[in-house]
Amino acid sequence: MKTVLITGGAGFIGSHLCEFLLGKGYKVIAMDNVITGSLKNIEHLRGNENFTYMHHDVSKHTVVNENLDYVLHFASPASPVDYQKIPIQTLKVGSLGTHNTLGLALAKKAKYMLASTSEVYGDPLVNPQPESYWGNVNPVGIRGCYDEAKRFAEALTMAYHRIHKLDTKIVRIFNTYGPKMRKDDGRAVPNFITQALKNAPITVYGDGRQTRSFCYVSDLVEGIYSLMISNINDPVNIGNPEEHTILEFAELIKELTKSKSKIAFKQLPLDDPHVRCPDITKARKELKWEPKVELKTGIKKTIDSFKA
């Protein structure tokens, strides 16, 4: 039985990964300090003999007293609302946390995966974004704490791969949604669903013509797993290439919730990307992966989870 450490294991994506890998027969150690995660996300796993929870801030010295086959570094605030409130912690988990987990993987002779993000592309001048695109990022803007933390984390991960010959993976995660998202997360999906269910105004920033590509969490986790067991060391985009405007998305949620909400337009936040869409040619070719869950299907499941 192989053992996987997942930092950020009580978070939205991390907790889904815990479930998935337990189902695949792995022993899972979830590490989290629950700054933005929630123990409710993993409460149902606590009775599983192959699951362990460690309460720890991975930005600090990290010790795991057992053998590890994989270290998956998924700890980080990921919502602009969160990382703009705690920018220093965000920078620390991307830098110190990445350094600590890379050192742990090296000591344990484990394979390593970094959860990176489409935000490394910033407000892109190329659409869709291939892995070869270097990005258009404001390092001193309000989003810089997250964008640059992840860009540094990628650079450090590749340095460990080149210098220490560590088997590393980098997954660039694009907009993902599904059950277990926090209602106060601040991102489009939970915002729109929460507002629509209350028949409150749905907040759209700017003119709503900026685009996003939304991937259902089960598809994302399948892609992460495919990369985890692959021989690929360069970054790989995992996301859904179906692009929608934010306004289209708001209208879809209104329709599916049968909401009486009106659209309320507000000023576009600083450095908010105008387009976001993954080029998944590499994932399709090298991982034989592509998303399967249609947007309407995934949104209905997410709405049901929010109602529950």
Image (cartoon, rainbow, N blue to C red):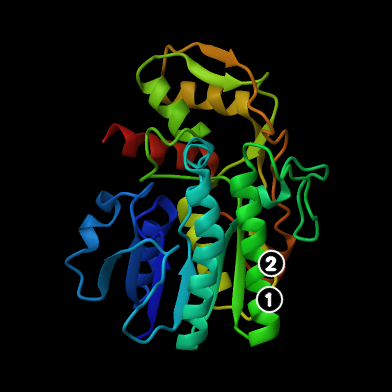
Q: Are marks 1 and 2 in contact (CB under 8 Å)?
A: yes
Residue tagged 1:
159
The residue lying at 42 percent from left, 64 percent from top is 58
Residue 66 can be seen, yes or no: yes
Q: In the depicted view, which residue is nearer to us: 83 or 215?
A: 83
Residue tagged 2:
155
SS at circle 1: helix
Give above or below for 135 relative to 186. Answer: below
Task: Tell whether 238 sits left or right of 305.
Answer: right
Task: Tell whether 76 sits left or right of 131.
Answer: left
Query: Could you tell me residue 151's position as x and y percent?
Result: 67, 58
Query: Could you tell me residue 105's position as x and y percent?
Result: 49, 80
- Mark number displayed over residue 129: none
Residue 117 can be seen, yes or no: no
Q: In the depicted view, which residue is nearer to us: 89 or 294?
A: 89
Quadrant housing residue 200: top left
Give above or below for 197 relative to 150. Answer: above
From mark 1 to mark 2, how far is it between C-alphas? 6 Å
Query: Could you tell me residue 235's position as x and y percent?
Result: 68, 66
SS at circle 2: helix
Query: Could you tell me residue 38's position as x and y percent?
Result: 30, 49
The residue lying at 39 percent from left, 72 percent from top is 62
Q: In the depicted view, which residue is nearer to us: 68 or 276?
A: 68
Quadrant housing residue 140: top right
Q: In the depicted view, which residue is nearer to us: 87 or 79?
A: 87
Which quadrant is the C terminus positioned in?
top left
Give above or below for 208 relative to 79. Answer: above
Q: Residues within 10 Å of mark 2 (few under 14, many from 20)?
A: few
The residue lying at 47 percent from left, 26 percent from top is 192
Identify residue type, mark 2. Answer: Ala
